[in-house]
Image (tube, rainbow, N blue to C red):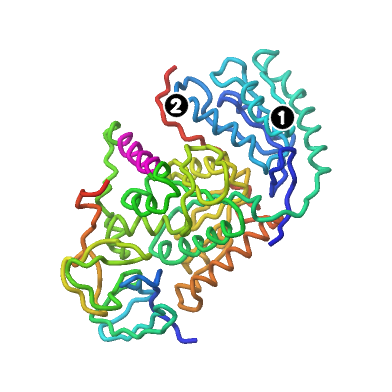
Amino acid sequence: MDIQKAIMLNDKDNVATLLADVDKNNVVQVMVGGRLMEIRMQGKTQFGHKFAIRKINKGDNVIKYGVAIGQATHDIEEGQHVHVHNVESLRARGDLV
Amino acid sequence: MKISGYLRPDGSIGFRNHVAVLTSVGCANDLALKLGRMYPNVLLLTHRQGCSQLGADNDQTFRTLAGLGKNPNIAGVLVVGLGCETIPAEHLANEISKTKKMVEYLNFLDDEGLMAAIPKGARILEGMMHEASQMTRVPCGMEQLTLGLKCGLSDTTSGITSNPATGIVADMVIESGGRVIFSETPELIGAERIVGERAASREVEEKLYRMVKEFKERAKASDMDLQEANVAPGNIAGGITTIEEKSLGSIMKGGSKTLQGVLDYGEIPRGKGLFFMDGPGRTPEALTGLNAAGAQIIIFPTGGGSPGGSLISPVIKVTGNPQTAQRLRDHIDVDVSSVIRGEEPLEKAGEKIFQRLLKVADGELTKSETLGYGSIAVWNIGLLCG
């Protein structure tokens, strides 16, 4: 079995989490809904960090564990690092309980 | 699937068969320790509460201590007190007696002091140990299990391996008719709506939100800032982006089922399914609360290798961190770092933990049990008023 370098926690997710450090242009394999996808990394990204498995538009929810963990503050391309520079917490906006 | 346990008089099942000394107050610990020297196999449930407490704090301590005595893993319990404390040993013993198990009590200050109490306590314990030694396991189902969950010393691997893998086990236990309790109220901050939306009723949902709100207010009243909108620099370096993500990483250990109820700390739930219990994340208090709520076995995902155990129940340590699994192998029971290496999917890791759970229920000792690692700590929520 090929080594998979990223993990999807839920089939509804639009991000995957890296299981190893990767360099720009590395191809990462991840199982998405039973299908093995191959995604080219847009930049050097670390173990434990997230990347987009498809395009996420500014304003879209970032989905991990099947639920929204934040909102994109910029357009995010497939394979791009998803983190504090392009995501804001929905919770921190203070409009929820 | 069939497992086996000790049938208690009230119909509950224990997966261990302990005899214990439980102190009604911290000042009586010394008698427990002396008796413990004579009987090393007796559990010494000592703590620092039971006096000078008022109101809800006193009620919580009473409920928790009673819950510990009631835990089905305990075959018999000797409650020891002085006689002057706020929580009388007799009241505690009476409450625990509702389970119809062996319960006795001793107040040594009412009598002739500690020295006179030692032979009396020893005789009681000897009788209980003799009775317990004749008990044998009977076959039973998963519906007799209350599984407690606690995560600790979390790192980047926690939210992507050990916690979600444990969540798979939680779902399996509930599907088999059992009960699961997860806790740690501070870990819900930022994700309470996500859990609330899975509540069985609006009442349960509202109770959950109230519980989280009260925890935050209690911190604020003491001038402490839980920094709920912030994620620590260590988390950010590790890849956690938002407070929701951080909380979810922890909550994942509870699985995906409907939330049937919300419990006070140390409250024993009614019915089956998934429950949330109020409580702190600090390990000894968290494990004590789960045991008081009836958990006979606890699964404890950890990134950094937290050694914490419980005297009353097996605590199964799970890690997805390969360094921890190797370096702290004396504390780790199940290694799921194969997921991090991309060798196995989460489902397989979950299955591995579940199989270990069945063996532990049947009697296989966990690392923390072999080490005898554990202590009682009752969550104290009030000021000392005396």
Question: Which mark, by number, is residue B56?
Answer: 2
Q: Is residue B302 visible?
A: no
**Residue type at mark 1?**
Val
Q: Residue B337 versus residue A71: which sits nearer the camera?
A: A71
Q: Residue B155 versus residue B356: which sits nearer the camera?
A: B356
Question: Which residue is at a point 64% across and 53% down the rendered structure image?
Answer: B143
**Neighbour class for label 1 at 10 Å: few (<14), some, many (≥20)?**
many
Q: Any magenta on residue B209?
A: yes
Question: Which mark, by number, is residue B103?
Answer: 1
Which secondary structure class fits the magenta region best?
A: helix
Question: Which residue is at a point 80% across and 48% down the rendered structure image?
Answer: B136
Q: Position of residue B233 (x, y in %)?
A: 27, 57
The magenta-colored residue range is B206-219
B334 versus B276 height, above or below: below
**Residue type at mark 2?**
Ala
Q: Is residue B134 visible?
A: yes
